[in-house]
């Protein structure tokens, strides 16, 4: 398909949970681990007149449905703020700073003042009937292989309550997700190829993870796509789970809109839901311009020059740059460097690789830890004791097994250091001679042999023993 000719316009919106200790507007834990609710409250939404004396028709429409919303309350993860019985507390500074950091990394302009706004929410997913959101960056950009894509906005906002159950009578929500800080990133509709959409989503995700301050795992990141073609209409596709599905979803949406346009019909502006096979189905009509108004319970926050300076100075290294650096600085292969960075253990790797063998450290962190879990402090002690010694795979596995079984580092490393017996060393020496027959012809073969054998047994056998065995073998020849 010629997407340029079809006039494909696509934008992406990403919502990512931040890994802060507390929620955005209260001191409840943002860990999202409470599973057992302590009680439940029932609420109904009632439309009221706005400042101009008019009742919003969409709000009235929802009121008339008479739905009952039930909210599950959790001990550590909800309080009177989530229940909308207490005004919001001051904004979580850590969340704000992570948001500003992301905005700077996306080349955004930073407003001088952060203003909290209320965005009307009518589905009950927020007890107050609105979501709090604050713009922290605008007019940024990100580069792709297809060209530059604008970043229209970076916002810090509250996550909504999680749907636990839904039926004809109403919805049951969990309050533990409500108020977890999110960063929302919206791009301009500058994406003109399906593959470019995937690239943008991947790059934004990578920049977010580079901060080391975002949550990982299912449900912590949500991607929406806005898609239109010439003669069609903007449709928002929600719930895109896998990055690899993005090109397919864009392609199928273009085909759908193209089909409607070809029949001479109008494409309606919908919110659609992504299905696992890349198709989409209708969810609801796209709302008009977002209904936003100021949150008068939150005073504006000044972004001082000093604060911005501090954030710019402490920007994290982008993951792809870290990968390149690990390859160069520590001699890791590309795949291994990627694995180290993606495991989120790059900092630990660098600390350990400075005292021990870099490749061994990388392999342990990315491969062996799943099988033999060893806490970071113990790994630190272990690699410190091991030093630059290279140990064979079997020995390493054996040691990690003992460590994960609770054995202290000093016992594990000492027993490995005892290493090879005299017959073991003889086998190694004979093997080296067999593979390198030319060394026996030089003037002092023991010197050349010593170098070759020590490469293999360093740390596992003392040099004096190796020399003794070498001299014995030379005499036999
Ligand atoms: Zn709370």
Image (tube, rainbow, N blue to C red):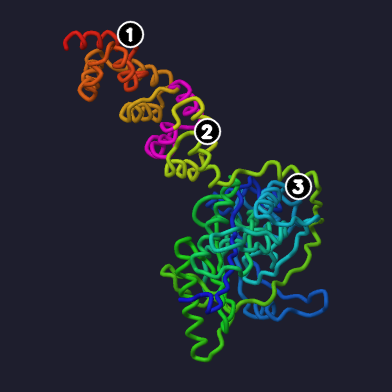
Tell me the quadrant of the picture where the N terminus can be found.
bottom left
- Residue at (68, 57) in percent of width and height: 156
Q: Earlier in the sequence, mark 1 or mark 2?
A: 2
Circle 2 SS class: helix
| Location of residue 146 in the rendering, given as x and y in whole percent from the top left corner | 54, 63
| 224 in relation to 105, above or below | below
Which label is found at residue 43? none
| Location of residue 350 in the rendering, given as x and y in whole percent from the top left corner | 52, 33
Alpha carbons under labels 2 and 3: distance apart: 28 Å
Circle 3 SS class: helix
Which label is found at residue 464? 1
| 454 in relation to 349, above or below | above
Work out whether residue 101 can be spotted: yes
- Residue at (61, 63) in percent of width and height: 149
Label 2 sits on residue: 350
Q: Magenta stretch?
A: 359-387
Q: Mark 3: few, some, or many residues within 10 Å (few <14, many ≥20)?
A: some
Q: Earlier in the sequence, mark 2 or mark 3?
A: 3
Q: Residue furthest left?
A: 476
Which mark is in front, 3 or 1? 1
Label 3 sits on residue: 308
Check contact, mark 2 vs mark 3: CB within 8 A: no
The image quadrant that residue 122 belongs to is bottom right
Work out whether residue 39 can be spotted: no
- The overriding secondary structure of the stretch rendered in magenta is helix
| Location of residue 450 in the rendering, given as x and y in whole percent from the top left corner | 31, 15
357 to the left or right of 141: left
| 341 in relation to 423, above or below | below
- Residue at (55, 60) in percent of width and height: 200
Tell me the quadrant of the picture where the C terminus can be found.
top left
């Amino acid at each position: 398909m010629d997407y340029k000719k079809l006039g494909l316009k696509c934008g992406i919106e990403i919502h990512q949970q931040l890994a802060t200790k507390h929620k955005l507007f209260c001191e409840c834990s943002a860990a999202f681990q409470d599973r057992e609710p302590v009680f439940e409250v029932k609420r109904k939404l009632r439309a009221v007149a706005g400042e101009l004396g008019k009742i919003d028709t969409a709000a009235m429409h929802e009121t008339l449905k008479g739905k009952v919303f039930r909210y599950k309350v959790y001990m550590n993860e909800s309080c009177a703020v989530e229940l909308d019985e207490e005004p919001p507390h001051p904004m979580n500074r850590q969340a704000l700073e992570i948001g500003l950091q992301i905005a700077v990394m996306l080349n955004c302009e930073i407003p001088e003042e952060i203003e909290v706004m209320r965005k009307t929410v009518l589905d009950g997913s927020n007890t107050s009937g609105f979501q709090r959101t604050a713009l922290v960056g605008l007019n940024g950009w990100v580069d792709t292989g297809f060209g530059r894509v604008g970043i229209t906005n970076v916002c810090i906002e509250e996550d909504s309550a999680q749907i636990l159950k839904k039926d004809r009578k109403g919805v049951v929500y969990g309050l533990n997700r409500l108020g977890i800080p999110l960063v929302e990133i919206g791009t301009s509709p500058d994406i003109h190829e399906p593959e470019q959409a995937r690239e943008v989503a991947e790059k934004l995700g990578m920049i977010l993870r580079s901060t080391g301050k975002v949550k990982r795992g299912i449900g912590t990141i949500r991607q929406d796509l806005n898609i239109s073609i010439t003669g069609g209409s903007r449709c928002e596709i929600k719930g895109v789970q896998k990055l690899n599905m993005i090109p397919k979803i864009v392609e199928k949406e273009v085909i759908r809109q193209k089909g409607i346009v070809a029949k001479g019909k109008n494409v309606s502006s919908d919110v659609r839901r992504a299905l696992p096979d890349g198709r989409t189905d209708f969810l609801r009509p796209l709302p008009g311009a977002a209904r936003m108004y100021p949150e008068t319970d939150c005073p504006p926050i000044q972004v001082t020059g000093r604060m911005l300076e501090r954030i710019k100075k402490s920007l994290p290294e982008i993951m792809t740059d870290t990968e390149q650096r690990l390859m160069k600085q520590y001699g890791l292969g590309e795949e291994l460097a990627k694995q180290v960075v993606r495991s989120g253990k790059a900092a630990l790797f660098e600390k350990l690789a400075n005292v021990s063998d870099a490749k061994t450290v990388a392999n342990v962190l990315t491969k062996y830890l799943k099988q033999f879990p060893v806490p970071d402090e113990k790994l630190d002690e272990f690699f410190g004791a091991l030093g630059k010694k290279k140990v064979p795979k079997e020995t390493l596995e054996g040691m990690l097994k003992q460590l994960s079984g609770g054995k202290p580092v000093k016992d594990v490393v000492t027993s490995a250091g005892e290493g090879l017996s005299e017959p073991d060393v003889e086998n190694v020496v004979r093997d080296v001679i067999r593979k390198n027959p030319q060394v026996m012809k030089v003037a002092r073969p023991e010197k050349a042999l010593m170098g070759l054998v020590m490469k293999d047994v360093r740390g596992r056998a003392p040099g004096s023993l190796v020399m003794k065995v070498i001299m014995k073998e030379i005499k036999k020849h």
